[in-house]
Image (tube, rainbow, N blue to C red):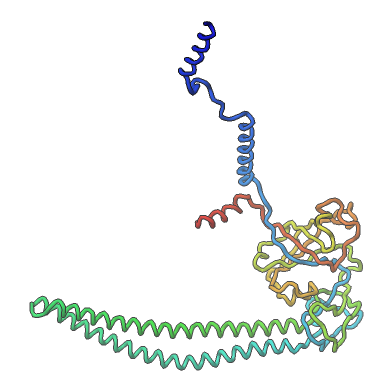
Amino acid sequence: MADDSLFRKAALDKLASPERLDVLMQVTSPKGWIALLTIAALLVGVVVWSVVGTLPERIDGQGMLTGEGGLRQIRASGDGRLTRLTLTVNQMVSPDQVVGEISAVDMGQAVQSASNDYNAQLQAHQAALASEQITISNLGIQRDRAQANVTKADANLAQRRENLAAGIGTANQVRAAEAEVDGYMKEVASYEQQIRTVREQGRLRLINLQRLQQQVASTEATVAARATISSTVSGKVVSIAKQVGDLVTVGDLIAEVESGSEEASTLEIVAFVSSRTGQRVRPGHPAQITVNGVPREEYGFLRGEVKFVSQYPESPATIARVMGDGRISEASYRVVIAPTPDASTPTGYAWSTGQGPNAPISGGTGTTVAVEVDQRAPISMVLPIIRGAIGG
């Protein structure tokens, strides 16, 4: 009997609270709260870092290790046959001194081709200009006639409206007169548009002529630069690699010059950065120099500082004389970088990773440089992307 009461009580309790609404339900476990708080902390940290933190903004370029003193090279600035060379061993040369000339058939052909294009377009422009003047004159006459018709139609419309007001005309007559005025006005607008179109064609041809003229001048300047061999340093000629009559290509060694002091104990990097971004580089900016043949992943990069920036971009021909090849095909700013000295390393310079390579580095080695021009908050780099995505 007692057992029946017990079971009956349990059944009644279940009926009284079928969903156990009076019992606290556990929604999230402690582990879930810990994970949620960790994610929230990370997000807050990212937001704070994006506002308070900084990322370096760098400008890349290509360069070459050179010595302050030591041997420098005079190299061919173009392709062709060496027609003049005014160098002898032990001769002293100065920067920008012309020491030779190169003659190339393709150089003359380039100038001739540009000139032919310009002359052909000039003749076509002059012929079209005469025809256009006649066309514009005829269109002007037709426009004036249409304008005279507009004047007559306006007078006729005014008369029709007076007649309608006096009761001796009809609304249809007024509408017909209005349509006549509108038609003549459209004729005037059409003739004026045709005149503008003809004049615009002439203007575009003139712009094209100016472009071709500039192209001729640019080609002539390029040919002149490539035809001239100049010394880039002052010093004494110690060896001559070519002679008059030899065929040369861009970057071929012409002669070596011993410049400055007797020993090249100090290195510097002569680099070139794009004319689009180079104006932001200033003396004092830190730089990273990756030396060709020195694995960056193993030894890192040389640390350095910008010492000089050219006032204006230098031409590809001038750059080829310094770099020894034509890999830089656009006008660029010259940047001189001094590597940071460190007597404790085998090379004598500071490296980003350890002691750097055990073997010394020497002038004439190619480099890639990255000049740090600014420090920016990460959020400032993201905002333009967000604005662009939302069309702001």
Task: Tell me if residue 58 can be seen.
Answer: yes
All told, the count of numbered labels is 0
Q: Residue at x 55, y 93 (%)?
A: 123
Where residue 310 sits in the image (x, y, percent)? 71, 68
Q: Is residue 205 above or below residue 63?
A: below
Q: Is residue 267 above or below residue 20?
A: below
Give whichever of 252, 30 is nearer the camera.
Answer: 30
Q: Is residue 199 above or below residue 266?
A: below
Q: What residue occupies the far left of the structure in this picture?
A: 167
Task: Tell me if residue 97 can be seen.
Answer: no
Determine which quarter of the picture holds residue 279.
bottom right
Q: What residue occupies the far front of the structure in this picture?
A: 1
Give whichever of 189, 372 is nearer the camera.
Answer: 189
Q: Is residue 250 above or below residue 372?
A: below
Classify residue 189 as left or right of residue 105.
left
Q: What residue occupies the far top of the structure in this picture?
A: 1
Classify residue 323 as left or right of residue 382.
right
Q: Residue at x 72, y 84 (%)?
A: 224
Q: Residue at x 31, y 81 (%)?
A: 186
Give whichever of 190, 62 is nearer the camera.
Answer: 190
